[in-house]
Amino acid sequence: MPVKAYDLTGRTAFITGAASGIGRASAVLLAEAGATVHCADRDAQGLDETAGLVERQGGTAHLHTLDVSDRTQVADAVAAAAATSPGGTLDVMAAVAGIMHSSPVLETRDEDLDRVLAVNFKGIVYACQEGARTMIAAGTRGSIVTMASGAVDTGGPGLLCYGAAKAAVVQLTKTLATEMGPHGIRVNAVAPGWIRTPMTSRHDADAQAHTEALMVRMAPLGRVGEPEDVAQAVLHLASDAAAFTTGQILRPNGGVAMPW
Ligand code: NAP
């Protein structure tokens, strides 16, 4: 690691959603920066593949198969991760796991709202709570990174459930940042633009190509994002390079949205 502030050697990171896409890329990059990574997801096979990527570059990955919307499962996994770390703590919690949902407001059912809020909002609340409690108990000046979305900056048809959950993640991030500051714990959100992952590739090929072409036209940088673009933002916020940054939203989005 050429820049010391990005060196995570000796640190322990817990990453949800680590079996795929942005979570996987984040786990691999944090491990490359020196962290021992605890990878959590409901997809056990995907977790194995992530572990293979981490270990191929000489890193150490521990795997936790869980549902982030189940508070007990999250608490148990975080406790197990802290118990295996040298200081009995976590230095980084990256709450990345999420699902996509699109339906017009007038067709949105209670079960859609409940499912998306359970995973995309409560799942991130639970990870933040367990991560923060663990850091406070050990006196660790850690970093919590949440995963919001560019959906918080723009309206869009079909985005009621997903966008509302992500807006709630931003509010969680700012609130928790104010409460954790006195403990020396930083809390920041990442709000990516369109990133090419399994989540955004579940459409048919024509719809995929159409959406990507639109995103490319909208982006000053003239391309869609890759998971590694977001992982770099996660690493930045997780590391000492962001030591004076808390309560902020970092937007790896190619310039599609430029809020104040
Ligand atoms: P992805 O490739 O689908 O990865 C998400 C991972 O989270 C998957 O392995 C998924 O498992 C897992 N997961 C979903 N629900 C879970 C649950 N209840 N418990 C445990 N694991 C669960 O998606 P991604 O694009 O990397 O997205 C990662 C995060 O970035 C999400 O929060 C997403 O909203 C956010 N984001 C993505 C984009 C984008 O353009 N891709 C843009 C902005 C924000 P399954 O495969 O079994 O569902």
Image (spheres, grey):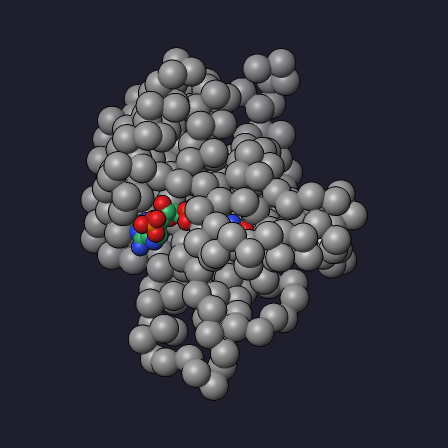
Residue 229 rendering spot, x and y as whole percentages: 60, 37
Q: Nearer the viewer, residue 36 or 133?
A: 36
Q: Residue 98: x percent and y percent?
A: 41, 54
Q: Which quadrant does the N terminus fall into?
A: top right
Viewer-closest of 216 and 190: 216
Q: Nearer the viewer, residue 79 or 191?
A: 191
* Residue 80: % across, % down: 22, 35
Which residue is the extreme one toward the bottom? 106
Q: Residue at x 42, y 36 (%)?
A: 24
Query: Is residue 174 visible in this depiction of the protein?
Result: no
Looking at the image, which is closer to me, 228 or 190?
A: 228
Residue at the image point whose x is 44% and y is 54% from the top: 202
What residue sits 22% from the left and 49% below the top?
73
Quadrant placement of the C terminus: bottom right
Q: Residue at left 59%, top 52%?
A: 209
Quadrant of the rendered image containing residue 50: top left
Image-based side of 148 in relation to 46, left or right: right
